[in-house]
Amino acid sequence: MEPADSIIRLGFRKWYERQLIEGHAWFVTCFLCMVAIAAVLEELSFRGPLPRILAFGVFVFAAGLVGCYAWLRYQRIMTAAERLGDQATCAACGTYGRFTMLSASSVRCRKCASEWRLVD
């Protein structure tokens, strides 16, 4: 399990922070692709030479693909981070994000030693 390996290596709080940063980097990529598409479509004129029109079309198509991929990555990363973030609170003492990974799915609170499943 990739999240469990990363959480073991970095700790939950750093892992969560990195997930949020990576997710928002993908969001910015998606936004920049949308801006690039809008700029190219505004510049597009069907009176110009055919190679220029084709180049604009290829650019819009490529930016659309990258933008869609970036949006899907953003959604996937943020969903996973929020799902694990919601389960990172100890039910016994209410401490958030302070646990040790026992296995790929089980954790133990560092404050009260309560155990629960983090990853299903």
Image (cartoon, helix red, strand yellow):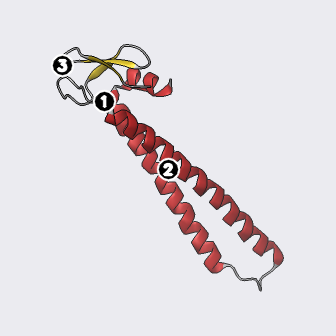
Q: Is residue 69 left or right of residue 31?
A: right
At 57% from the left edge and 61% from the top edge, which residue is drawn? 33
The secondary element bearing badge 1 is classed as: loop
Q: Which residue is mark 2?
A: 26
Q: CA distance from mark 1 to mark 3?
A: 13 Å
- 96 shown above or below 106: below
At label 2, the amino acid type is Trp
The residue depicted at 63 percent of the width and 73 percent of the height is 40
**Residue 43 placement: quadrant:** bottom right
What amino acid type is highlighted by mark number 1? Ala
Residue 42: numbered disc: none
Q: Earlier in the sequence, mark 2 or mark 1?
A: 2
Residue 48 image point, x, y percent: 77, 83
Q: Which mark is residue 88?
A: 1
Q: Is residue 62 left or right of residue 2?
A: right
* Amino acid at circle 3: Lys
Q: Circle 3 — which element?
A: loop
Q: Earlier in the sequence, mark 1 or mark 3?
A: 1
Tell me which label, 3 or 2, sits earlier in the chain: 2
Q: Quadrant of the C terminus?
A: top left
Horizontal side of residue 58 vs 22, given as left or right: right
